[in-house]
Image (cartoon, rainbow, N blue to C red):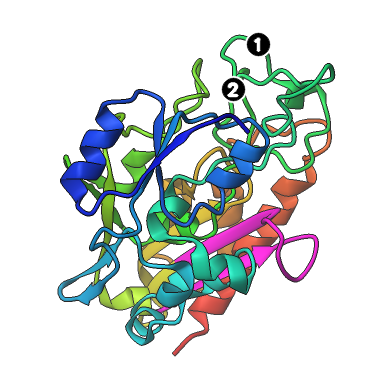
Amino acid sequence: MNLFTYQRPADTNAAIQAINHDDHAKFLAGGTTLIDLMKLNVEQPTQLVDINRLPLNQITIKDRVHIDANVRNSDLANHESIKKLFPVLSEALLSGASPQLRNMATVGGNLMQRTRCYYFRDPSGSGASPCNKRTPGSGCSAIDGFNRIHAVLGTSDKCIATHPSDMCVALAALDASIITNQRTIPFNDFYVAYGDDPVKETILNHGELITAVEIPATPFFARSHYLKVRDRASYEFALASAAVALEVQGGKIAQARVALGGVASKPWRSAEAEKALVGQIAADDLYAKVAEAALAGARPQKFNEFKIVLAKRTLVRALSTVAAMT
């Protein structure tokens, strides 16, 4: 770990000024990802700006649900209104990490969570792995390496890393918006395609601070579910996951939201799946066709082709579960 300085500003303006004066400074909230990456020398900030004192830890329920960026994952997951309005969000949070980590991790930090790619996290020593996320132009070790956990959607010939968050998959399905000190960003515009520059993962500017997430209190979001498939029952990242919300009227699907996790370079909202659902009779044979549409653009690698079948089955099961809710 490199040497760094530490500041703990008392207000938002002071925190932003501290970051703006140093191109290599980072905001520190729960630190559950950042500190790990600093220990590995993947992240090498020259300054940490601790934002835990900032007044950003409230959940406000109105026509839109306002969730401050420093709300802890455990508090959000167990909030009674969140469980009632957005079960998919509560379920996604509770399926991630461990209770201890959820007690520390924040909403804003979860949005900025970086990939779990083995090669991205291996920057040191003579056997260091080339990684375009760390060093642009150095190559992607995963493409010709062991890529079982890697993405099949949204990849490029420069990077196939998977976005690891559970919470963000739920937010992708809930029409969420991200609020910063500069603007409001629709959730599905927040992450950028890997393309030729896998280093840039979001549209945030340096010094732009996430202050909150907002979700519309859309009634049918209460009929939602998050399903996560992984190698073991706890403390494991998704091999495939699905976040689903449905409005069913008279046996037909009037509105639908579908997002996939564990299989893509970002939380993957599937417009193809939603289009295939709306106006159709809720039935198992429909869900299989929807899953085919959702994964039609998948590009597997040597060791992760199984993810396509797994994601389809996960989505079918999630849709069936939500359609059966009363």
Residue 181 on image: x %, y %: 18, 44
Q: What residue is drawn where x is 75% and y is 27%?
A: 142
Going by the image, does 221 lie left or right of 162?
A: left
Under mark 1, the amino acid is Ser
Q: Which residue is mark 2?
A: 134
Neighbours of disc 1 within 10 Å: few (<14), some (14-19), many (20+): few
The quadrant the N terminus occupies is top right
Can the viewer see residue 95? no
The quarter of the displayed image where residue 238 is located: bottom right
Under mark 2, the amino acid is Arg
Q: What residue is drawn where x is 47% and y is 57%?
A: 30
Label 2's element?
A: loop
Q: Is residue 295 above or below residue 201?
A: below
Q: Let me know if residue 242 is in the magenta part.
A: yes
Going by the image, does 172 lie left or right of 97?
A: left
What segment carries the magenta color? 223-244
**Residue 43 vs residue 285, the one in the foreground:** 43
The quadrant the C terminus occupies is bottom left
State the mark number for residue 138: 1
Q: What residue is drawn where x is 56% and y is 73%?
A: 94
Residue 145 on image: x %, y %: 82, 26
Residue 133 on image: x %, y %: 58, 24
What whole-number distance in Å separates the C-alpha atoms at marks 2 and 1?
A: 8 Å
